[in-house]
């Protein structure tokens, strides 16, 4: 560097840099107490809202034992509703989540969604699932028997208003799931009981 | 037309049908899945390949020891629609239809061997029972024969120390089939499917059923 540029650096550039650093320091000292105050406000306990008394209902879900020879009960609690179809939807969403017991296996694909539930006056329940119900299913005669039976036992044991049920996918009747069982018909608990037994203790 | 000659020929045909009961109809072996339909998978093993190998071995054993005619619904790795498999069995007027599958479900342990036969449709089936030769109800009349074969196969498997269970479920795999049909879902184990005792048990059950 020549002497003129050294003078520029020393007399103009360095003071400017020092001044900018000073400004940043000053602004930090000024804003820090405010930030702390905001943080303390957000972490403070929220004022209590008026609590609604929502009743809970005990339900029984059915999952597969290892190897798929039997179904086994697992209890859960859901929020009760005056509408049966709402309770059915909540119950089957719990069934999709899978078992909590380590020794049990799922009965429905975890990616499947229950889109809607229709319950007729005569007690026929239509369960309308998303396409993942088919796409993510492992198939097999046993696999389909387990899914059909777990849905049947869960529905028909928890909801006495339901006499029989049928599965729809994306709003349409399905002939089969993965080409093993007949799915385009309604099933009652009496029929489901023929397919697979529930392990009793 | 020489009537005595015709009567003589008819008598021979009648006698021959008694002496050669195996001419009644072929055994139809159905290796499940195939082609784009791979079936189940376990440790990179494909159901479609394992069941095809098994069917070919069973066919080889039966045809080498007896005169039973054996047909397969597929001979290689290609897709055959379910309706076509059933139509093929019906067209050849088979005496018995055996569909081979492997046990597949959500469980990590894939489960034991199961022998299934047809459970007739309920309400919809009832509505159509009056109609003759309806696709949905045609298998209904063979349920008893299929059950007796399922129990016979279970017995033969047990004699060779293979555990199995017989169950009746609403199978679309057998819907429309105009002959007794059984679905065997073996344990998903290539070691099991390679065993000579297993193939021998299946062949032995078939031969006894055809007697």
Image (cartoon, coloured by chain):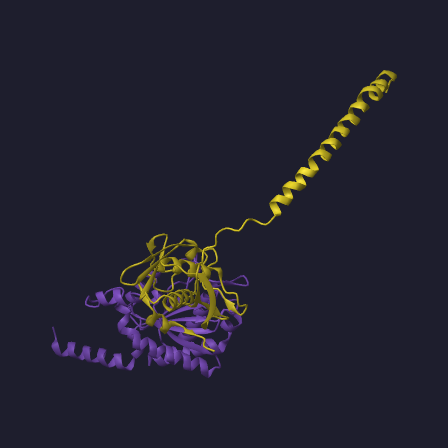
**Along the viewing direction, whichever of B15 and A31 lies nearer the viewer:** A31
Where is residue A141? Give x, y as percent.
41, 67
Residue at the (37%, 73%) spot, across then down: A193
Where is residue A97? Give x, y as percent.
48, 60
| Quarter of the image where the N terminus of chain A is located | top right
Where is residue A175? Give x, y as percent.
33, 59
Colour applied to chain A: yellow
Residue at the (49%, 81%) spot, across then down: B161
Residue at the (38%, 69%) spot, across then down: A157
In this rendering, the answer to whether B162 lies above or below B189 is: below
Q: Residue B197 vs residue A175: left or right?
A: right
The answer to whether any part of residue B81 appears in the image is no
The answer to whether any part of residue A23 appears in the image is yes
**Along the viewing direction, whichever of B113 and A177 lies nearer the viewer:** A177
In this rendering, the answer to whether A87 lies above or below A62 is: above
Q: Which chain is purple?
A: B
């Amino acid at each position: 560097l020549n002497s003129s540029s050294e003078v520029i650096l020393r007399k103009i550039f360095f003071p400017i840099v020092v001044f900018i650093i000073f400004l940043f320091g000053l602004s930090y000292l000024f804003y820090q107490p405010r930030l702390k105050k905001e943080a303390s406000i957000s972490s403070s306990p929220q004022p209590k809202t008026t609590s609604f008394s929502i009743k809970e209902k005990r339900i029984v879900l059915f999952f597969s034992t290892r190897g798929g020879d039997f179904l086994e009960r697992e209890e859960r609690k859901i929020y009760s509703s005056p509408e049966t179809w709402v309770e059915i939807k909540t119950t089957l969403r719990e069934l999709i989540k899978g078992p909590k017991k380590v020794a049990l296996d799922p009965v429905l694909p975890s990616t499947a969604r229950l889109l809607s539930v229709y319950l007729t006056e005569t007690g026929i329940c239509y369960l309308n699932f998303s396409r993942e119900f088919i796409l993510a299913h492992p198939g097999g005669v046993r696999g389909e028997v387990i899914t059909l039976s777990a849905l049947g036992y869960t529905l028909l044991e928890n909801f006495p208003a339901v006499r029989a049920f049928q599965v729809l996918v994306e709003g349409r009747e399905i002939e089969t799931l993965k080409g093993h069982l007949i799915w385009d018909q309604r099933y009652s608990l009496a029929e489901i009981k023929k397919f697979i037994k529930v392990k009793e203790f | 037309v020489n009537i005595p000659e015709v009567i003589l020929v008819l008598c021979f045909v009648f006698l021959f049908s008694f002496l050669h009961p195996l001419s009644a109809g072929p055994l139809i072996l159905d290796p499940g899945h195939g082609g784009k339909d791979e079936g189940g998978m376990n440790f990179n093993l494909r159901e479609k390949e394992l069941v095809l190998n098994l069917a070919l071995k069973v066919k080889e054993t039966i045809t080498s020891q007896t005169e039973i005619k054996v047909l397969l619904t597929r001979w290689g790795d290609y897709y055959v629609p379910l309706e076509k498999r059933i139509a093929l069995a019906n067209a050849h007027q088979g005496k018995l239809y055996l569909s081979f599958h492997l046990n597949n479900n959500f469980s990590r342990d894939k489960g034991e061997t199961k022998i299934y036969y047809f459970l007739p449709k309920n309400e919809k089936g009832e509505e159509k029972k009056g109609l003759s030769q309806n696709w949905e109800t045609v298998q209904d009349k063979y349920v008893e024969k299929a059950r007796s074969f399922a129990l016979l196969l279970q017995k033969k498997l047990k004699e060779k120390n293979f555990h199995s269970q017989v169950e009746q479920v609403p199978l679309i795999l057998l819907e429309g089939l105009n002959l007794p049909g059984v679905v065997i879902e073996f344990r998903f184990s290539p070691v099991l499917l390679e065993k000579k005792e297993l193939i021998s048990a299946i062949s032995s059950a078939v031969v006894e059923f055809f007697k």
